[in-house]
Amino acid sequence: MVAASLLAAFWAAFALALISPGPNFAVLLGTALQRGRAAAVKVAFGMAIGEAVWGFAAVFGVALLAARHPWIGTGLRVGGGMFLLYLAFLSIRAALRRNETDAGPAAAPSPATAGGGVARGFGLMLLNPKAGVFWVSLTSVFLTPETPASIGVIAVAGAVLLSLGWHTMLAVALSADAVTAAYRRLRRGLEATLGVVLAGLGLRLLVSN
């Protein structure tokens, strides 16, 4: 029962961050509009692979180091907490701004081969340091060194499935017409909600032992 509650909270926090508009959305939008549905779905698949790499690295690599060296765990909690508070500030500030087009120049994909879509999505996740820090912060909040390895595997696997499902759904939806207006209506609410959640997680990290 405790494990189920832990996993549900982990996935809920991950899902809130996942649906917040950002670089992933911009790349998916550009790919869908310029190359069509198939290419956008490949990008979504690559993003899911990148999530898996960050997730398992955070669960098994950083957690093990933190268990052996307490000062690493303390540094991660402080750094992760401050970074989450910073992201919360950015999200709330974005929510207070007027709606504007988020898919700017960064959304325009470069020419690629048939497998380029997967590589683009994977590279976007792997080369994004914010993704790594977020994963470390999230696992530090919900997964302790005493947490069974099986729970960590299930947590990461569920998060990867959420990532694949959400980004695939976006790829399909963004391949249709007239989606930008709907996104603009939802953007501010999503950013505000994410800001509050990230602030709570950041404060929890900073005050935890």
Image (cartoon, rainbow, N blue to C red):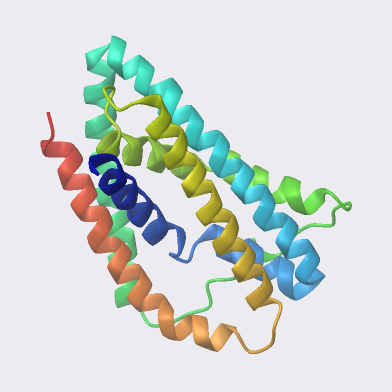
Q: Residue at coordinates 66% horizontally, 68% vertically from top-left? A: 171
Residue 136, can we see it?
A: yes
Q: Residue at coordinates 37% horizontally, 17% vertically from top-left? A: 64
Could you say which is closer to the camera, residue 25 or residue 3?
3
Residue 135: percent from left, percent from top: 41, 40
31 vs 203: above or below: below
Q: Residue at coordinates 29% horizontally, 28% vertically from top-left? A: 76
State the image quarter where residue 31 is shown. bottom right
Residue 191: percent from left, percent from top: 35, 69
Residue 97: percent from left, percent from top: 34, 77
95 vs 142: above or below: below
**Would residue 63 be found to the left or right of residue 183 on screen?**
left
**Would residue 25 be found to the left or right of residue 88 on screen?**
right
Q: Quadrant of the N terminus?
A: top left
Residue 10: percent from left, percent from top: 33, 47
Residue 105, can we see it?
A: no
Report the residue that reaches farthest toward the front: 1
**Would residue 60 be found to the left or right of residue 177 on screen?**
left
Report the residue that reaches farthest toward the top: 68
Could you say which is closer to the camera, residue 2 or residue 160?
2
Q: Residue at coordinates 81% horizontally, 50% vertically from top-left? A: 116
**Would residue 20 be found to the left or right of residue 181 on screen?**
left
72 vs 10: above or below: above
